[in-house]
Image (cartoon, rainbow, N blue to C red):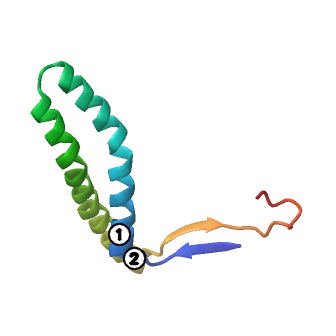
Amino acid sequence: MKKQIVNVSVVQSAKVLAVLYMLISLPVLAVMAVIGVFAGNVGSAILMLLIAPLIYGLITFLCTGLLAWLYNLVARRLGGLEFSTEELSSTSAKA
C-alpha cells in the first residue's frame, strides 16, 4: 500500500527537532567544556555549556521550519514523499 506525505507541520516539526538537537549537542559540548577547563578557559567553557545548546536549538528550529515550509510548497505542486506500508500479523510484530 502506497502512502504520500502531503503536508508537514512547520512549527511542530521545528520544535521537536530543535529540542532533539539541543539534547544531542549536550554530550559533545560537555567534552569540549572539559577540554576548555584543562586549557585554562573556565569562563569560556561554562559560557559554552549554557549558551551553545540554545543557539544550536534556535538555528535548528529556524532551519527545520524553513525546510518544512519549502517541503509543503513542493509537495503541493509535485506530490509528497511516497512510501509503502504493509500490515503485519500480530504474531510477527515485535514489541
User: Can you say whether 66 is above or below 7 in the image?
Assistant: above
Q: Residue at x 31, y 73 (%)?
A: 69
Crowding at mark 2 (Cα within 10 Å: few <14, some 14-19, many 20+): few
| Residue 81 image position (x, y, % from top left) | 51, 67
Of circles 2 and 1, the one toward us is 2
Q: Residue furthest right?
A: 91
**Mark 2 to mark 1: distance in Å?**
7 Å
Q: Which amino acid does label 1 sit on?
A: Ala
Q: In which quarter of the image is the C terminus?
A: bottom right
The dot on residue 23 is: none
| Residue 50 image position (x, y, % from top left) | 20, 47
Q: Mark 1 points at which residue?
A: 68
Instruction: Kindly check if marks 2 and 1 are in contact, taking CB atoms under 8 A apart as contact.
Output: yes
The quarter holding residue 42 reads top left
Residue 59 left/right relative to 43: right
The quarter holding residue 9 reads bottom left
Q: Which mark sits nearer the N-terminus, 2 or 1?
A: 2
Residue 80 left/right relative to 33: right
Q: Mark 2 points at which residue?
A: 9
Crowding at mark 1 (Cα within 10 Å: few <14, some 14-19, many 20+): some
User: Can you say whether 6 is above or below 83 in the image?
Assistant: below
Q: Residue at x 32, y 74 (%)?
A: 11
Residue 15 left/right relative to 47: right
| Residue 60 image position (x, y, % from top left) | 28, 57
SS for tag 1? helix
